[in-house]
């Protein structure tokens, strides 16, 4: 059978570090990047006799995440011990949630490439503590443990196996990331490990009702690697089945350099975690009032902003999606349009030149160096005819390098648009003289010649001539 006869099935378990100031069971700071073992205390170092106390903010953030992803919030919930030994887990168990997670039965809606919408169901969202980190010594052998991350609060968001392609997995992760950013429960910095996914993949013949056996790739933290890993792993499984083999349920490691998965010889499901309720912690009981209060204070979510942009500003569905995918971009859009009153222009600049430069520089929207006011001012300068949009492009480049008042930029650089009739006429005459063939072409009915002449005049003035005036004056001369 061919590849097209198979269907890929994916389920994701996403861990997001919560942006609470302190850890989940002690008052150590959660900040990233400190010297090893400086954010530790007897509790998160697991000294005998210490007692954990649940950080209430963790519950609040998890409930927020649950409400923002259409989950049911459990009125009764608890913490359980998940027992396993690993050198970065000094207690030899992780405090997590087993049979009574805080949130269940939610969904996230994603957009497919053909514009259709699809709901990906969430099985659950639970709270748990992060483990420490092992630093493998490159020189003397051995490993050193850093417990700064031990006890940093996490939510784990588990999806149903509803995802059917690498592209859908990417759309799901991006949507989830944007929701978590909007409600400000996680900074979602993937490069710092604040958002990471365990990726479960299986394949089955199209039309089959049973799922195939899955493999799991743990702790992936880049969209690109996840897409590549899913595609590679699905292909590998199809090859095995086509050759008459069977898929082993196992944990794999994705290697970004070779672009392959490797067996870690560790069958997650076979492990017995001996879950039991943590006797040191009281049960979590939430009142209706508590949940209502969080619900009423949720900020506007991407979905609602998207709908509002289409309605209020007449933006296209695609542009609204792109703008609202990042809270920062969306905020910048709203602020700038509030100043210059030209929503379409703001959206266009953000989604064309600004996005292109972000891509080239490999920056995230929250690293845009200029302000909404500066962007708005640049657009106003175009609207007033002080500069052309060709110069606008140069101003945007400059705003990335050396952000300041666009009016100052164009004065300094001498980029103010030439709208003086005499000056324009001079350029028009010069260009006509140099291009007799274009004049003949135009008279022979080739309208394209006009565009060429205007282009030459723009070149001559380094983009500063007013294009409407050029057009008009060329036409007048050509029709003489
Ligand atoms: P665990 O990994 O802790 O054993 P589960 O068995 O509940 O937990 O599954 C974890 C993840 O694997 C979920 O996101 C689920 O959607 C996904 N999953 C389960 N079965 C399959 C399958 N056959 N193919 C792909 N993903 C699957
Ligand atoms: Zn501590
Ligand atoms: Mg798993």
Image (spheres, rainbow, N blue to C red):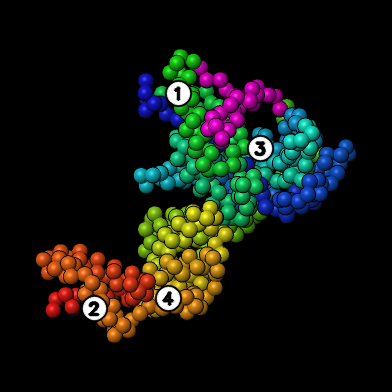
Query: Which residue is identified by label 3?
Result: 100
Query: Which residue is identified by label 1?
Result: 238
Residue 63 % position (x, y): 63, 49
Label 1 crowd (10 A; few <14 / some 14-19 / many >=20): many
Identify the element where label 1 is drawn: helix
Q: Nearer the viewer, mark 2 or mark 4?
A: 2
Q: Earlier in the sequence, mark 1 or mark 4?
A: 1
Q: Is mark 3 within 8 Å of ligand 1?
A: no
What span is in magenta?
Answer: 246-273
CA gap, disc 4 and disc 3: 64 Å
Q: Left or right: where does residue 193 sit relative to residue 368? A: right
Query: Which residue is identified by label 2?
Result: 429
CA gap, disc 3 and disc 1: 37 Å
Residue at the limit of the structure toward the top, as seen here = 244
Q: Earlier in the sequence, mark 2 or mark 3?
A: 3
Query: Which residue is identified by label 4?
Result: 415
Q: Nearer the viewer, mark 4 or mark 3?
A: 4
Q: Quadrant of residue 430?
A: bottom left
């Amino acid at each position: 059978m061919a590849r097209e006869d198979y269907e890929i099935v994916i389920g994701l378990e996403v861990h997001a570090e919560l942006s609470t100031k302190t850890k989940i069971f002690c008052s150590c700071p959660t900040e990233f990047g400190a010297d090893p073992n400086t954010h530790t205390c007897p509790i998160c170092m697991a000294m005998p006799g210490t007692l954990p106390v649940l950080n209430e903010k963790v519950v609040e953030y998890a409930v927020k995440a649950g409400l923002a992803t259409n989950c049911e919030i459990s009125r009764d919930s608890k913490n359980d011990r998940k027992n396993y030994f690993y050198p970065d887990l000094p207690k030899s168990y992780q405090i997590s949630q087993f049979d009574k997670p805080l949130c269940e039965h939610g969904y996230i809606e994603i957009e497919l490439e053909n514009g259709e919408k699809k709901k990906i169901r969430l099985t659950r969202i639970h709270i748990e503590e992060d483990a420490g980190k092992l630093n493998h010594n490159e020189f003397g052998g051995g490993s050193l443990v850093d417990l700064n991350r031990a006890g940093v609060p996490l939510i784990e968001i588990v999806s149903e196996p509803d995802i059917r392609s690498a592209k859908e997995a990417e759309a799901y992760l991006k949507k989830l990331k944007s929701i978590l950013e909007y409600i400000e429960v996680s900074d979602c910095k993937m490069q710092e490990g604040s958002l990471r996914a365990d990726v479960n993949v299986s394949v089955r013949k199209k039309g089959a009702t049973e799922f195939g056996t899955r493999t799991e790739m743990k702790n992936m933290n880049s969209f690109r690697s996840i897409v590549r890993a899913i595609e590679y792993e699905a292909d590998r499984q199809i090859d095995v089945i086509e050759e008459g083999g069977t898929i082993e349920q196992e944990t794999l490691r994705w290697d970004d350099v070779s672009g392959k998965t490797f067996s870690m010889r560790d069958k997650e499901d076979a492990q017995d975690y001996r879950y039991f309720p943590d006797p040191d912690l009281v049960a979590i009981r939430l009142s209706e009032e508590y949940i209502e209060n969080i619900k009423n204070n949720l900020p506007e979510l991407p979905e609602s902003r998207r709908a509002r942009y289409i309605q209020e500003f007449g933006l296209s569905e695609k542009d609204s999606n792109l703008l609202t995918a990042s809270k920062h971009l969306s905020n910048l859009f709203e602020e700038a349009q509030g100043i210059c009153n030209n929503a379409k222009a703001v959206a266009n600049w953000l989604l064309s030149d600004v996005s292109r430069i972000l891509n080239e520089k490999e920056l995230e929207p929250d690293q845009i160096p200029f302000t909404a006011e500066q962007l708005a001012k640049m657009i106003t300068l175009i609207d007033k005819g002080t500069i052309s949009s060709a110069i606008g492009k140069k101003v945007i480049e400059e705003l990335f390098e050396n952000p300041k008042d666009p009016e100052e930029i164009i004065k300094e650089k001498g980029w103010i648009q030439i709208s003086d009739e005499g000056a324009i006429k001079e350029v028009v005459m010069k260009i006509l003289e140099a291009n007799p063939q274009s004049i003949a072409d135009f008279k022979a009915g080739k309208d394209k010649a006009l565009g060429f002449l205007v282009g030459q005049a723009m070149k001559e003035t380094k983009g500063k001539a007013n294009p409407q005036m050029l057009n008009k004056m060329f036409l007048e001369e050509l029709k003489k």
